[in-house]
Amino acid sequence: MARERVLIVGGGVSGLAAAGFLSDRFDCLLVEREPEIGGYCRTIRQGGYTWDYSGHFFHFRNNWVAEYVHRRMDVSRLLRVARKSRVYFRGQYIDFPFQFNIHQLPMPDFVHCLADMYAASQQSKSGFSSFRDMVYGRYGRKLADLFLIPYNEKLYSVPANRLDGEAMGRFFPHIEFATLLEHIATAVDGTRHESDTYNAKFNYHRDGARAYVDALASYIPPRVVQTGTTCQSIDLERKQVRIEDEVVTYDRLIVTAPLPPTLHMIGWRDPQHLLTANKVLVLNLGFDRASSREDHWVYYPEPEWAFFRVGHYDNILGQGRMSLYVEISMAQDDEVDVEASLDRALVDLKRAGVVVGHALTSWAAVLLDPAYVHITREGQTFAEQCCAKLAANDVTALGRYGRWVYCSIEDNILQAYSVAREWGAAAHIGPAEA
């Protein structure tokens, strides 16, 4: 039996960051079932286009994390971008976030939204039992019914009353009524105002998300990463993992794979099926001419559109040919028909005026499964209990899917760093407060 001090399951951002932080003190082995590292941050290069597995743009709040990653990149190819995003609603474009820009709606809708939000602002804003209750309670019925509920139900493929009121945490762009009035007052002269939300400015590399993956991997010593290797079962009592035809014994185990299959590998169950998620089909599409609009991405909340978001890589990279990612949300049990989805998406892109005389020259499909985890009160309690039981057995769950939470790529790196510092490693890498 081979023996490694620390075994890491999963070669996405969390696993790679952990291996880089821990390798100064521990003998590490990282196993990844796919033939290449990166998880959902992999990049496709095809037909002269650069596409990621989905629209991954990097927005760092922590300067140390940004510097740690960027120092191992060709920063001459790094773009720092001010977001241009819209909502396509009833045939017109509304600046995103929608709730910040209701003054761009037709006057009857605007007045109704404003009146409902004022009434909601006079009520208590705490103790919401669901996402639906939260948006009704904070924004009023009109604004909630126009956009906040239909878009998020389309995104998550689940009723809004199933999601926790804080399901999106800091990633939901909140605005108070008084602040909204100030925002509207400064916009009456026709000036466009981008909101100060978490992704109002972002970084992107001309080589795609893979540049960030390669930067993290550059901190890992040779022969630590083993791709094309599947973890089949975990024996907590013996501290052993069966990997292909080999049994590996560990002192500490880090798992970044999604929590439900991890429980299955251990022999645990989710008897009430509390850990749920949707899946997202990403269609990466390349066309023969440039985009007719300048948007970086556009949201489509209405059910008539097959997709919930369409992003323009060419508008970020400054390319002369339209390069799109088109995201289609599905329930966990929905069947995936890629060809039918492509046909429907192309029809809808033409109806929306995105494709105007463009010819499709290249495309690639990616299925993200799971994609957006459903944050519910019961599910989070169960996930936290599972993670605590794992920790009691020297197993650390890391990352969005490992811990079944909603978080950013930066959060995943910081989680990995926190574990390394807790274990006495990575002291030379960064500040304790990182």
Image: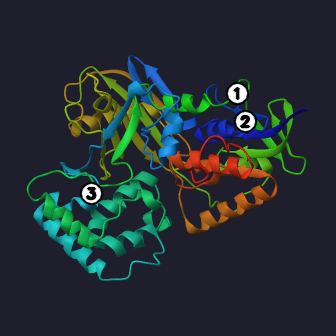
Q: Which amino acid lies under the numbered mark 3 shown in the image of this protein? A: Phe
Q: Is residue 398 above or below residue 287?
A: below
Mark sitting on residue 221: 1
Quarter of the picture containing the N terminus is top right
Mark 1 residue element: loop
Foreground: 337 or 172? 172
Mark 3 residue element: helix
The residue that appears at 60% across and 44% down in the rendered structure is 430
Question: Counting residues from the N terminus, which is met first, the one under dot 2 or under dot 1?
Answer: 2
Mark sitting on residue 23: 2
Q: Is residue 319 above or below residue 162?
A: above
Please indicate whether residue 254 sits to the left or right of residue 48 in the image: right
Location of residue 383 in the rendering, given as x and y in whole percent from the top left corner: 65, 60
Mark 2 vs mark 1, CA separation in Å: 7 Å
Residue at mark 3: 98
Location of residue 336 in the rendering, given as x and y in whole percent from the top left corner: 50, 39
Q: Is residue 118 visible?
A: yes
